[in-house]
Image: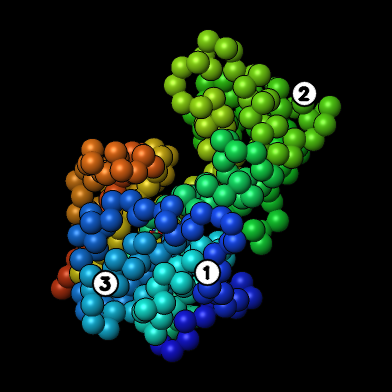
Amino acid sequence: MDDPGVTGNGGRRPDCTEVRPGSRDPRQSHVPVLLQEALRWLAPRPGGRYVDGTVGAGGHARALLEAAGGDVELLAIDRDPEALRLAAERLSPFRDRVRFVHGDYRDLDRILDEAGWVRVDGILLDLGVSSLQLDDPRRGFSYQVDGPLDMRMDPTQPLTAADLVNRASRQELADWIRRYGEERWAGRIADFIVAERQRRPITTTGHLVEVIKAAIPAGARRQGPHPARRTFQALRIVVNRELEGLEEALTRAAHRLAPGGRLVAISFHSLEDRAVKQAFRQLAARGGFRVLTRKPVRPGEEEVARNSRARSARLRALAREAGVGVGEPGKAGEPDGDG
Ligand SMILES: C[S@@+](CC[C@H](N)C(=O)[O-])C[C@H]1O[C@@H](n2cnc3c(N)ncnc32)[C@H](O)[C@@H]1O
């Protein structure tokens, strides 16, 4: 490969030098989670073809390229163009072996077809939001600092968190906050949002935090995590459709593995982990795949002490059985000519 440019969504090319003036170098703030464990289960080998479906700042990708050595090729996907710019910078020593794609890993079949890759030796999905996104107030993910109520991982998509908060029905808001945030005060929070937006639109994270705080009774607010944490998680999941089609995407991804190839997924909340577990179990039950991690791999105390974001991480790994014939990729959930 000789074109390390970004393809997809308009074929943008990453600006490899961009680090915002005056800001903390964002590469320093992102520490890859379960790094050694991810490498261990991916077991990259020289000459292999790999996909990082959520390349972020390129931490896992760089370690993979270093560990595999030789002439490994990597397809690096992210839906966030800013993440791709940082990844391109971080992976610049390997630029002739990495292809960047601005896209959604749920479109992996199309992305691989466009790249002309039929089979791959490993796929990594480090799901969810990155600390680059969380830490940048302009992205609107954080309940800790004020910023526009945005929460889009891909700023080229039209729908923002402000659109949802100001336009969704009371029932939709309550359902989302209950289901995706597992928030017991979901109904009250939805009521307070609807009452407040009739006075004036809620367009900043700070404003939404105030509304949530007012909705949760003082006694409950003093216990546990930040009172806005669950609602923000729920809105982020809805804005980015994080759980939509996840199981199917994992199933389809698994069917692009070469014999012996590995699929490694790192999730950060129980709903995501459940989808990974389900998809892997079903693949193994149908035959041709093996779940490598009987239980999810969790970070050790030392990693959690170094990086609190790792606390909720769970890694699961799946292998395509070696030694079975692999035909053309088929539809997800169907035998695909594996013999
Ligand atoms: C936890 S971070 C990945 C960090 C990365 N492993 C590293 O070491 O720097 C997750 C990344 O996945 C991206 N992402 C989330 N959902 C995605 C999707 N459906 N398709 C493509 N990228 C996605 C986010 O934009 C974010 O950059």
Numbered disc 3: secondary structure: helix
Q: Earlier in the sequence, mark 1 or mark 3?
A: 3
- Cα separation, mark 1 vs mark 3, equals 20 Å
Q: Position of residue 324 (x, y in %)?
A: 19, 72
Q: Position of residue 320 (x, y in %)?
A: 24, 65
- For disc 1, the marked residue is 85
Q: Amino acid at mark 2?
A: Ala
Numbered disc 2: secondary structure: helix
- For disc 2, the marked residue is 195
- Cα separation, mark 3 vs mark 2, equals 54 Å
Q: Amino acid at mark 3?
A: Glu
User: The C terminus is located in which quarter?
Assistant: bottom left
| CA neighbours of label 3 inside 10 A, class few (<14), some (14 to 19), many (20+) | few
Q: Earlier in the sequence, mark 3 or mark 2?
A: 3
Numbered disc 1: secondary structure: helix
Q: Amino acid at mark 1?
A: Arg
Residue at 71% of width from left, 42% of height from top? 162
Instruction: Give the number of the mark in front: 2 or 1.
Output: 1
Q: Is residue 216 left or right of residue 76?
A: right
The circle drawn on residue 66 is 3
The front one of 26 and 249 is 26
Q: Earlier in the sequence, mark 2 or mark 1?
A: 1
Residue at 20% of width from left, 66% of height from top? 43
Instruction: Check the image and report above or below for 286 versus 324.
Output: above
